[in-house]
Amino acid sequence: MPRLIPATGLLLALALLAAGCSRYQLGTGSRPAFASLGVEPVVNRSTLPQAEALVSARLREAFLRDGRVPTVTSGAAAVLSVTLEDFRREVAAVREGDTGLARKFNLTLSASATLRETGSGRLLWDRRPFTVTREAFTDGGQLQSEYQTLPLLAEALAQRVAESRCCRCPHGCGSIWPVFSQCQLFVSPGPGERRC
């Protein structure tokens, strides 16, 4: 009898563990609101020259890495268009010997994204804002530093857009909700989005 108590306790613990993990699933658990995605070439209204191709490529790569929604060049269920709105350079630290010269800049890239269903023309996002910031140290020269930081800004922006998704409402009403894959939280709808 004394040996039976630890064995029963172990079986009970294993049963509780199995029950706790039975509903686990990989990913966010959300269903995308569309089956395929087309990514239009990025439009550049900022003062950052020649950023369109780099950001467009990084956007496509981010969606390919994510893998939940296939990106297609034609016949997409939804189309994403991104516009680079602003590029700012702010002094974050000055040189020790000359306070008139910057040693470090904060580079900020702002964009807006519109996501539209192609069949109905319904807007899922309407100029949703995205902003990313990276630091650039000017020890090797300001131009070289900004040139090296641009791919990092583009990657961060693409990742932020790819993580910001729309999915069907989990209550089954058919509404579109934004989903942020890292935190898995439903948030308040933005302009052009509905909530049940």
Image (spheres, rainbow, N blue to C red):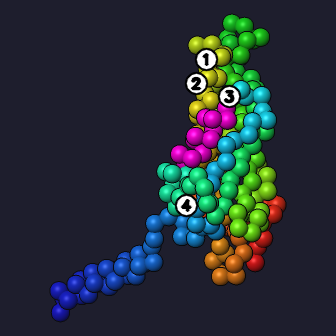
The kind of residue on which mark 4 rests is Val
- Pointer 4 or 2: first along the chain: 4
Q: Which of the 4 image quadrants contains residue 94?
A: top right
Q: Residues within 10 Å of mark 1 (few under 14, many from 20)?
A: few
- Pointer 4 or 3: first along the chain: 3
CA–CA distance in space, label 1 to label 2: 6 Å
Residue occupied by mark 3: 50
Q: Residues within 10 Å of mark 4 (few under 14, many from 20)?
A: some
* Residue 53 in magenta stretch: yes
* Residue located 58% across and 24% down the image: 148
- Pointer 3 or 2: first along the chain: 3
Rendered view: 190 above or below 130: below
Rendered view: 183 above or below 85: below
Q: Residues within 10 Å of mark 3 (few under 14, many from 20)?
A: few
Mark 3 or 2, which is nearer the eye? 3
Label 4: which secondary element = loop
Residue occupied by mark 1: 144
Q: Return the x and y of residue 1 as percentages of the image width and height.
A: 17, 93
The kind of residue on which mark 3 rests is Gln
Q: Is 60 positioned to the left or the right of 188 in the image?
A: left
The kind of residue on which mark 2 rests is Gln
CA–CA distance in space, label 3 to label 2: 14 Å
- The circle drawn on residue 69 is 4
CA–CA distance in space, label 4 to label 2: 30 Å
Q: Is 12 positioned to the left or the right of 75 in the image?
A: left
Rendered view: 190 above or below 107: below
Q: Which residues are magenta?
A: 50-62
Query: Contact, CB < 8 Å: mark 1 with mark 2?
Result: yes
* Residue located 62% across and 60% down the image: 76
Q: Which of the 4 image quadrants contains residue 49?
A: top right
